[in-house]
Image: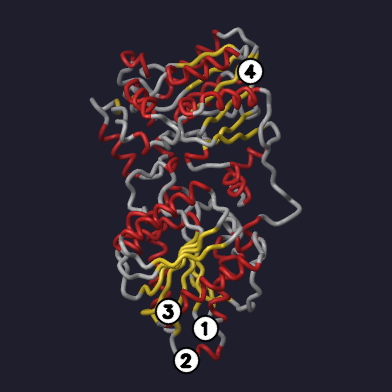
Amino acid sequence: MTAFVLVSGSYTGGSVWQEVAAGLRAAGAEVHPVTLTGMGDSRHLAGPDTGLETHVEDLVQLLDRLETPEVVIVGHDYGIHPVLGAADRRPERIARIVHLDAGIPLDGESVLDLLPDPAIREALVQQAEDGWRIAPPTAAQWPMLGSTAGLTAEALDTLTRQAAPQPLGTLTQPLRLTGAAADVPTSGILCTGNGMSIGMVETVLGMGDPRLQKLVDPRVGFFELATGHWPMLSVPEELTEVLLRAAAGEGHRLAVRTDELPAHLQPFLLDVPELERERVGQVDLYLPEAAAATAGPRPAVVFVHGGPVPAGVQPTPRDWPALVGYARYVASLGAVGVTLDHPLHSLSDYPQSAEAVAAAVELVRADPRVDGERVAVWIFSGGGLLSADWLGAPPQWLRCLALTYPVLAPLPGWGMGETRFRPAAAVASAGRLPVVLTRVELEVAEIAGTVAEFLAAAEAGNADVEVVDVPGGHHGFETIDHTDEARRAVERAVGSVLAHLEG
């Protein structure tokens, strides 16, 4: 017999697992939905000293009591922190660790360390009642912690009613791991409605993120659920089935292909002149050929990569074929093409990246070969959130803003709250700034949702947005989809941007 130990996320107790627990028991499993100290109906047991270590010890004691030889321990959201802590202390008792829409915290990291927005971290600490507990969310606040997609109004009401204050120490105490559980098989269950999918994990893995390399282990299996962050409430039957499959060692296996370049390093879809770059710090300039340069200072297009991109990735984004291809292409047409590196390595880096991009643009504008009054900024993918600053207060010299397969609002699982990096809100202030938006047909659904939100806001605010569609196109299509439709889309987008610079 398999025993499932189910550990839910912040503010919640074992009651959220009611339907899943019933399904697992019906399948013949032993089930232990855990209510950690101070959570759910044990809220009266919490005190100023309740912390992550308290919850780790809760699970260690439970594992010591269990007689079932095979234990699958499931950590949802915050719950993965005490789960990993307990598994590290009792690795011999664990047959499998399941990350249910949860991250991969490392030794020394606290929950607050992993929240991307410093303002949210500070607000949580400041809001702690009596200095040690954080009030549970209201019904309107739950979506800020993770997507509530799939929850009925009744389920959301129950979640709100049963939620308990979260002891601050559970979020501030660092997780302590010795590596003792490193060889325990694991499974990941991703809730696509919360902004993560197997495809997205594989994309980041292909960039060489060392944090994810252990996911290539053949004992690691992945599953997807088309729902929000609370699958035990929104799709309990589907989650039950997936947990049983995970316990059996099933799941999608990730693989790193060593016989070919990763997608982002494949060749650019257009044949462009091999123009040499001129490197200035973190900025590369691709200059027009001499004939165009004699016409005086030229307009410039600054290409801003997406992310987050793991630190240490080589080559860095400014040397990726797609960005270099765009820069050489616009240079061949008479403008200065610019690529750059900026420090978007994690979700907490957007403020630093915004500063770095703004500084790079000013460096380009100050170059005597550039007409500083005719500049376009062209942003890709997860860098799309950086466009909020340019949309919110567009300078006169910014003649065009281009966006390609962009993320235009933080995804639900990113935990960014009411951040300034929300282009879908900022576009109302764009005025007559021309925006050229390249949209791919086969976009990740969650990213496509942010684009739809942006376009609706743009229409309501009479913003000047031109949409360039790529039929059959994928995210990162310039090195994936070498089709006539994709080539025409790039040519049209570049032509439109250059026309705005010349106008």
Which residue appears at 54% of the width and 79% of the height? 331
The residue to which callout 4 is attached is: 92
Q: Measured along the vertical axis of the image, is residue 340 above or below residue 290?
A: above
| Distance from the alpha carbon under mark 2 to that under mark 4 | 73 Å
Quick check: marks 2 and 1 in contact, CB under 8 Å? Answer: yes
Q: Earlier in the sequence, mark 4 or mark 1?
A: 4
In the image as oriented, which residue stretches furthest toward the left?
130
Secondary element under disc 4, as helix, strand or loop, is helix
- Inspect this view and state whether residue 305 appears: no
Q: Quadrant of residue 385?
A: bottom left
Residue 123, placed above or below residue 137: below
Mark 2 lies on residue = 295
Q: Residues within 10 Å of mark 3 (few under 14, many from 20)?
A: many
Q: CA distance from mark 2 to mark 3?
A: 15 Å
x then y, percent, for residue 77: 46, 31
**Residue identified by numbered label 3:** 501
Q: Position of residue 90 (x, y in %)?
A: 58, 18
Mark 4, other Cα within 10 Å: few <14 / some 14–19 / many ≥20: some
What residue does disc 1 label? 334
For the residues labelled 2 and 1, the Cα–Cα distance comes to: 9 Å
State which tag comes first along the sequence, 2 or 3: 2
